[in-house]
Image (spheres, helix red, strand yellow):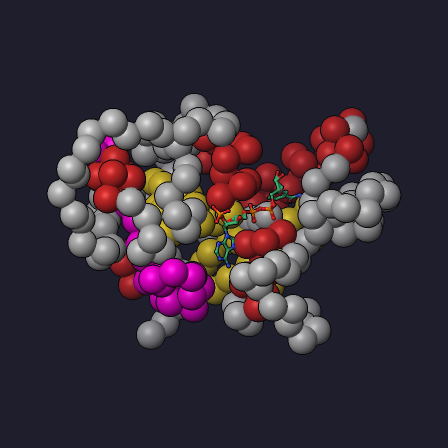
Amino acid sequence: MERPYIICHMLTSLDGKIIGDYLKTERTANFTDVYEKIHGRYESNAWMCGRITMEEHFTLGHKLVFEQKNIRPIPRTDYVANVNAESYAIAVDPSGKLGWTENSIEAWNAHRADDHIVEVLTERVSDAYLAHLRKIGISYIFGGKETLNFSLVVEKLKDLFSIDKLMIEGGGYLNGSFLNEGLIDELSLILVPIADGASKSVSLFETSSYLNKTNPVNF
Ligand SMILES: NC(=O)c1ccc[n+]([C@@H]2O[C@H](COP(=O)([O-])OP(=O)(O)OC[C@H]3O[C@@H](n4cnc5c(N)ncnc54)[C@H](OP(=O)(O)O)[C@@H]3O)[C@@H](O)[C@H]2O)c1
């Protein structure tokens, strides 16, 4: 199966941090504008972020509460809510935690207002969450039973949504997942000339209990 061309597009401090106090400085604000401009220049119709990034910037920690009991089981098959969408915001949310209340991010980001949301899930997600996504018109795909296989995910993005060019835009755990599977074709790095200096902080590529350290990767 075919997959999209994949660009990891990120902004870091000189010490490779993707979060930290340096992001709040006036100097960084100029680079953040450049980040958005370069995003546009790639002319990609799809970008992807991890659950923590989506929660911080878009759903703002909103939690969904499902009161209805005995929801009928929903098959763990991919669901395309909008066959006419032209651009996509793709959220990696393995157990369905993101509190979406509508099917676009317009309210939070005017630049990417038309992007149709696609959730990347594992089969662990609840039926109530799937029913909610269907109700508000969010598409979803399954990337594995318990854990995510991103090679499968990107093949599905090409097959179901015709995505040819995909921007991977953090955070460090999502980037690390793609690095792990050898799925990054190009790195677009905006290096802000500031050293953040924090030692415990998220960096460009991370490892974790679900991510092994890769062999060094050339770019
Ligand atoms: N400087 C930049 O350019 C830039 C860009 C983007 C984001 N950021 C910043 O980065 C920070 C968040 O980064 P982060 O690295 O902590 O989080 P993240 O990558 O945004 O999200 C991590 C979460 O995504 C899910 N996930 C990612 N890879 C997975 C895998 N292989 N298997 C299963 N689940 C996976 C998990 O969700 P669950 O926990 O639900 O299982 C995981 O906890 C935010 O503060 C954001 O503002 C900076």
Please name the residue shown 49% across and 44% down the image. Answer: 51
Q: Quadrant of residue 86?
A: top left
Q: Residue furthest front?
A: 69
* Left or right of 20, for residue 60: left
Q: Residue 182 location in percent, x, y?
A: 55, 71
Q: Residue 216 location in percent, x, y?
A: 70, 73
Visible in this render: residue 9? no
Asked if the stretch drawn in magenta spans residue 147, the answer is: yes
Asked if the stretch drawn in magenta spans residue 20, the answer is: no
Q: Nearer the viewer, residue 61 or 179?
A: 61
Q: Residue 136 location in percent, x, y?
A: 25, 32
Q: What span is colored magenta in the figure?
A: 135-158
Q: Residue 153 location in percent, x, y?
A: 38, 62
Q: Nearer the viewer, residue 5 or 137?
A: 137
For the N terminus, give its image quadrant: bottom left
For the C terminus, give its image quadrant: bottom right
Visible in this render: residue 17? yes
Rendered position, 212 above or below 72: below
Please name the residue shown 38% across and 60% down the image. Answer: 146
Q: How many marks?
A: 0
Please name the residue shown 32% across and 48% down the image. Answer: 125
